[in-house]
Image (cartoon, rainbow, N blue to C red):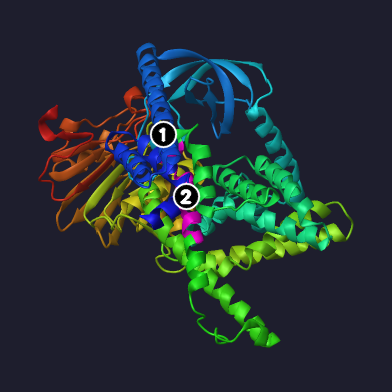
Amino acid sequence: MKQLRRWVQGAPLFLPLVAVCGAIPGSWWWGLAVAAVLVALGCRLWRIAICTLLCAAVAGLHALRLDEKAREFCELAELHEVVELRGTVERTLQRGCVLSTGWGGVRVVLRGKTLYTPGDEVQVRAQWQEPRAAGVRGVFDSAAWMRGQGIAASLDIVESQKLGKPLSLHTVRYWGLCIREKLALRLMPPGTEQEPARQVLCALVLGDKSGAEAETMEDFRNGGCLHAFAVSGLHVGLVSGILWLLLRALRVRPVVIRPLLLVLVGAYVLMTGCAVPAIRAYVMLAVLLLGHILRRRVSLLNTWSFAALILLVPEPCQLYNAGFLLSFGVYAAICVATRLCMQEKPWFGPDDYIPVSLRTRGEMRWSCAELALRGDIIVSLSAWLVSVPIMLYFFHSANTSSFLTNIAITPILPVVMFLGLLCLCTAGIPWLGGACAWLAQKSAALLLAVVAWFGELPHAYLPAQPPAPEHSLLVQGTGYGGSFTMLGNHGLLIDCGNDVTAELKTVPTLFHAGYTPAALLLTSSRVRDGGGAAVLQRMWPQLPVIRAAELPAEGLVLETQAGRFSIYPDTRSHTPGQPPVVEWESSVGRVLYIGNASYAACQPFMEAKADVVVLGEHSRQPVQAGDVEASRVLLLPVVHDAAAMADDAHLQLVLPLDTTIPGKVLPRDSE
């Protein structure tokens, strides 16, 4: 008990943090808060017990109040459909913005084309939009993202009006982002946006990944280093270390460096967007520096707890945010690993029983290299072990080679960051600026090459779900009447949407559902230049693409691992490029994909009974469910169907069909 009491006294904010983490979810999680209070009482630490109880009560009541406000707003918006709001823009999205109605109000997402910037005060009329969950776990889930951001609802803008731009924290944040945009032009001048090395520099140094292409993002994602593209504790730590070394090299005294670092690093965090991991790192750095300035002992666990409380008490939704959990979880793992590393005996090098004063210069260098390598391996492995369960829960995927990639890039990252900052400072200076920019680009290119090499290792990036059965179908709506169909694993993929749809919907859905296409058939004439075929070929380089307009008159037969696919073009129509009919024959059944083909094109295939018919709707000669002989009929979303405009249903069937299937499925006699 004495040891526990001493440990609690060394980190008095840890028990309040545990209590807050239990109070925010509520329900039986309140047991954590009760246990934390009982531990403090058992150690006879009355002030810590009172603080723990107060923190739990404040956080729990605040979370309950926010949930109640969000529920009331959703009920009101759903009842009236169109609501009027007035608030401040917190951040902009790709198509819309996040609006806060102020203290005691709610936070909502406004969808639509807007020209607002953070800090703008606006008044809008918006229409209620039903929140949609992802059809396949692992694909971007807007409902889960909204919960992690504390957003009550998603609304479509009907009309809006800007009222002004008062001074607020969001306005200051916007000024910081404007400074970042101007600095990004030094790293990526106009005309160089296509260079991957410059994209890496902007993302790593400034946290600006808006100019990063999909290929660059995929390399870092597959290599398990996507955290380098978001300003986090890694960036704040590197910037702090670089500034400290530079100021010490200029013979600035530490008593001056510490308050100067508080200002400079704070400006850097503000300029890069004030992300949660960056705020966590800055709060901990500020406590550490203030402790040295005031000559007070600083506990890492207590500082870590203080940073978490600073974020959780005002915004309880952060507990459901993947970035928050990854930042604090990985940092805790790094601290524990560093302590274990210092206690671990040397793996090689001089005997640790030899005093440091008796070691030669070569032995000292060898000992430092061994310690650096040992720390790199232990820290990277510990951080990977903590991040894996969080990645599995939130993203339904795992990087098997992530810790190897982090070990390899650890000596490269400080160099890239230092040269990137040097490039920012020397831009515009003749000769020196060009030399620094060249060195920065070369180091960034080396970093990208290392990450890409590890990302190409077998099974480097895996979904949490095992591969789908060979004889299964997947039908996924992509919104606004679009859809794609996967016939069998290692079978035929029919349609994939445009580039945006393929990148955000098709590829993630196939990856997380466990499907690998053997060929791609494009049937839609509305999508130019093959739509998202290039996006799929980036994921599966050997994927052949079949276009309906290029099919021979006699059709095409494709033999795959999933079975035999016969693709028949519409030879009865005088309009070229009409959707074909696909017949899939396997050892367990027969599937007829009609899609949006015409009645005349499907007539030769209606006599033989099929196990499943996938049916769309032709504009002039539609095929009805009663026209085909089948055990099950799957209806695809159609553009003119208002109910299907936002259809995002996921349907997976395993043949033979002997169970009740949820989704848009009609039996033969449903007509």
Estimate the x, y position of residue 218 in percent, counting from the top left: 51, 55
Q: Quadrant of the N terminus?
A: bottom left
Q: Is residue 320 magenta?
A: yes
Estimate the x, y position of residue 480 in percent, counting from the top left: 40, 30
In front here: 73 or 55? 55
In front here: 643 or 29? 29
Q: Secondary structure at mark 1?
A: helix
Query: From which residue to which does the magenta span run?
Result: 318-335
Type of amino acid under label 2: Gln
Which residue bears the numbered disc 2? 9
Q: Is residue 360 above or below residue 586?
A: below
Residue found 63% across the figure and 29% down from its top: 170
Q: Residues within 10 Å of mark 2 (few under 14, many from 20)?
A: some
Estimate the x, y position of residue 213 in percent, counting from the top left: 58, 50
Of the image marks 2 and 1, the number of the one nearer the N terminus: 2
Q: Left or right? Give the position of 444 relative to 569.
A: right
Type of amino acid under label 1: Arg
Label 2 or label 1, whichever lies nearer to me, is 2
Q: Left or right? Give the position of 253 relative to 355.
A: right
Residue found 88% across the figure and 61% down from its top: 431
Residue 638 can be seen, yes or no: yes
Residue 544 can be seen, yes or no: no
Q: Are marks 2 and 1 in contact (CB under 8 Å)?
A: no
Q: Secondary structure at mark 2?
A: helix
Which residue bears the numbered disc 1? 147
Q: Residues within 10 Å of mark 1 (few under 14, many from 20)?
A: some
